[in-house]
């Protein structure tokens, strides 16, 4: 699921406009960008189902003052892995962890890691929506700003539609339920496995069901999140942290 779907079509349009040839008249740039965007969204819509479920990504930030341009700039910097562009969007005192890691120099080091892990984490995070805090704050993913009724340290979000909850730690075991953007609690398990042992509470019956979900379809509630604040009429990333 692309950022155009998670954060909103308006953001993608702003990004498309920024990529157009500035020598073109504005009306021509707008028309071409809009046509390209409509085509992209239509193709994406045909290939990727709209997220549904209690904690499915949604965008509350497109109506914030300057929010569209800021989010488009964040997306563009991540898409191109442009370190300088991303640093320009960060506050000087950006918080990076809970052990004292902070500041643009430390952020540059993390973005420059050879394996590109940090960039990939940022790209995945942007697919998960944006929560607005009045007119002065943004939180990505959207779900992190919500009251989720599970222990955040053990909780995880099922990141997809119709994800199987298996009876055992293998895809050839019976399917007990199919979950779409639900919250689950991860449980202790021994040995290595591609499946996580989880407990899910059926919202209809309140019955607790234990089973196994592919780890690739889960994201910890306290995984990476981006916090942005409006300072002096400009949006800046003030925190980019994981854990608690």
Image (tube, rainbow, N blue to C red):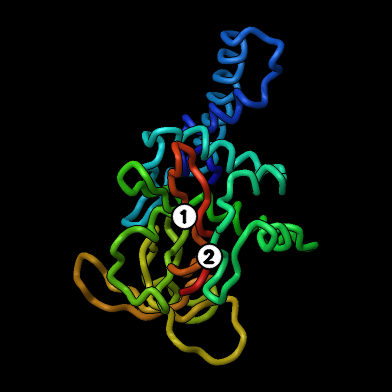
What residue is disc 1 on? 227
Q: Position of residue 210 (x, y in %)?
A: 37, 81
Above or below, 167 against 127 in this view is below
In this rendering, would 233 be left or right of 107? left
Residue at horizontal 20 percent and vertical 65 percent from the top: 204
Asked whether residue 180 is in view, the answer is: no
Above or below, 58 against 222 in this view is above
In this rendering, would 179 be left or right of 243? left
Q: Which is more toward the observer, 96 or 6?
A: 96
Above or below, 109 against 90 in this view is below
Residue at horizontal 38 percent and vertical 36 percent from the top: 64
Q: Quadrant of residue 134?
A: top left
Which label number is shown at residue 241? 2
Asked whether residue 3 is in view, the answer is: yes
Q: Position of residue 226 (x, y in %)?
A: 50, 56
Which label number is shown at residue 238? none
Label 2 Cα neighbours within 10 Å, binned few <14 / some 14-19 / many ≥20: some
Residue at horizontal 46 percent and vertical 88 percent from the top: 188
Q: Position of residue 164 (x, y in %)?
A: 45, 66
Are discs 2 and 1 less than 8 Å apart at CB? yes
């Amino acid at each position: 699921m692309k950022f155009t779907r998670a954060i909103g079509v308006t953001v993608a349009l702003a990004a498309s406009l920024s990529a157009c040839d500035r020598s073109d008249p504005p009306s021509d740039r707008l028309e071409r960008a809009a046509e390209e965007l409509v085509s992209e969204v239509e193709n994406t819509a045909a290939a990727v189902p709209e997220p549904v479920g209690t904690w499915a990504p949604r965008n509350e930030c497109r109506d914030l003052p300057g929010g569209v341009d800021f989010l488009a700039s964040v997306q563009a910097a991540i898409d191109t892995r442009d370190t300088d562009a991303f640093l320009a969007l960060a506050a000087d005192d950006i918080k990076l962890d809970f052990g004292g890691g902070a500041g643009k120099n430390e952020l540059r080091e993390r973005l420059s890691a050879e394996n590109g892990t940090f960039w990939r984490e940022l790209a995945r995070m942007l697919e998960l929506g944006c929560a607005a805090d009045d007119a002065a704050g943004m939180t990505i993913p959207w779900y992190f700003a919500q009251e989720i009724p599970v222990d955040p340290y053990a909780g995880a979000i099922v990141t997809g539609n119709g994800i199987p909850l298996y009876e055992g730690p293998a895809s050839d075991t019976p399917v007990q339920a199919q979950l779409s953007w639900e919250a689950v609690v991860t449980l202790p398990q021994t040995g290595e496995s591609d499946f996580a042992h989880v407990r899910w509470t059926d919202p209809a019956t309140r019955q607790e069901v234990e089973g196994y979900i592919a780890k690739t379809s889960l994201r910890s509630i306290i995984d990476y999140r981006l916090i942005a604040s409006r300072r002096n009429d400009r949006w800046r990333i003030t925190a980019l942290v994981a854990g608690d």
